[in-house]
Amino acid sequence: MDELNVTPGLLTVWRAVPRGVEQGTPQGVEGAAGWVVDGRAASYVQEAHIAGALAGGRGAERDPAWLATAFELPREARAEGGDTGGGGNGVLEAALLAWIDRHESLRSRLVPEKTSRGGLRRDTLPVGGIALRRTAEGNFTCGKSLASRIEEVFDAETDPLDWPSFVFATVEHTDGHTLYLGFDHSNVDGYSILLIAHEIHELYAAISSGTRAALTEVGSYLDFADIEREYAALVHTEHAAVVRWREFLGSGGGGLPEFPARGRGERGDRGGERGGPGGPGREQIGGCERLLDADAAHAFQRACRPHGGNFLTGVLTCLALAAREEEQGEGEQGEGELREGELEWESGEFRALTPFHTRGDARWAHSVGWYVGLAPLRFAVRRGDSFADILTAASTALDGAGEMAAIPFPRVSELLGRRLEPRFVVSYMDMRRTPGARRWGEWKAAALRSRRVHPDEVYLWVNRSYDGVHLSFRHPATEPARHAVSRLVAGTGRLMRRIAAEGVPGTAVHVQNVLPRDLVPARQQEPAPC
């Protein structure tokens, strides 16, 4: 939030309550009318997320884990009906309620209770079963103070152990209105966040004009979670994907990958599963860098395709080469140079985890939920390899990765009898296909994430939009980590610009993707991890 240019103004917070709950009744009250016991199971990622929160105990201070979006609303948007009452029927309120009705997962809660299908019981409210209660927080004249207050609200009211674990805010200012929506991760994934601005704008326009919103029908994440749970329960310890996970762990000394480039002075001790550059409880920091403009992004993709690669495998190749150079101490080299260092790269391969969406069926395409699985990624980056060699290796490594991601990561951990915690994750998303993407600039749309405290996680998000390619990142707040990550990002950008300008040699390779129909990512020009 503190990196967002927040326009000051009048802040109003909107909280969901079960319809019929009188003003002043505690939100999420267990006995509220309307909740119906729902036999559909929690997804594995939801259960693991909530179990992690429960481990600290109810009422415990825990790190927030929210995702959020902010965007401008039509200038005429008003929160009609009073400052604190729940009975207003303004267009904005109607649009927000219609959006909640559209996505059943927001009308459902998970209660810790042992069932035949996990450790959580699901209760659900029907369509129309939610009202919104508004509270005017006052007028803010300082954007930074306002951003801080919105972040405080998100931190406090997106608790995965309470319902609702989401909260909305509007800011009325001289330029119009801005809407902020924050959700605990159990409700949404990154792609869900990108869908929100378009849907609420469409609903607002339709309600204003008395027409039907131009939105496709969506499936319920609750149905997906139930199907996934049934499928994952059939996976056993000798399933091919589980065997590949076991081999992946074994090839890395028994642990998951960590960030490959440690920075000078950090080359000695790599620590254990929780070791790393940050130390216990280290606050994470991050940033975002533009790697390519739109024209260069097209040129980069065209350069990779004749050699069996695509945009994602090209990005991974550049990351691997930049990491090798940083590990070898070659960070001072000139623009786009690929000369070898005097030292052998410590591991000789690039290792990371990469997320894939699991929106395999058309009904999940625009559904709000946590449709993400993790896959292991490992390919050689040997001395003397050309870009095309590594591009081929990266493409081969991704072959079948979607099948592995279709098995929920917590289920893999369960089958392997290991507590596995991702530490180095590389995500790619082509956001151009997202409904409304061409209007994000007009709406001043932004995607946000909560702060993170972790001793050694490094996350990289490569996002392609109509404006080009950006790399967002976070890492432990230490100078060695900052140095290593910033150099890796800069080196990756240099290599991508070189390939866009000069092209690459290479050998073609065919990448296949086979998954169960209900869970397979839709075939696209590029893989679309999230």
Image (cartoon, grey):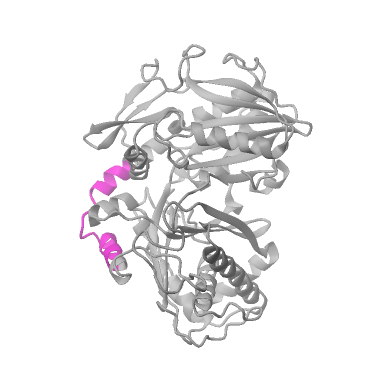
Q: Going 59% across and 72% down the picture, which residue do you hit?
A: 491
Q: Nearer the viewer, residue 509 or 289?
A: 289
Magenta: main secondary structure equals: helix
Quadrant showing the N terminus: top right
Q: Going 46% across and 45% down the picture, which residue do you hit?
A: 362
Percent position of residue 233, x then y? 24, 47
Q: Specify whether residue 244 is painted magenta.
A: yes
Q: Is residue 198 visible?
A: no
The magenta segment is 227-247
Asked which quadrant contains residue 40, the reply is top left
Q: Is residue 415 toward the left or the right of residue 306 in the image?
A: left
Q: Going 53% across and 31% down the picture, which residue do you hit?
A: 167
Q: Specify whether residue 41 is painted magenta.
A: no
Q: Is residue 349 toward the left or the right of residue 115 in the image?
A: right
Q: Is residue 327 toward the left or the right of residue 90 in the image?
A: left
Q: Nearer the viewer, residue 13 or 2?
A: 2
Percent position of residue 91, x then y? 65, 23
Asked which quadrant contains residue 273, the reply is bottom left
Up-down relation of residue 312 to residue 408 (above or below): below
Percent position of residue 94, x then y? 60, 23
Percent position of residue 43, x then y? 34, 41
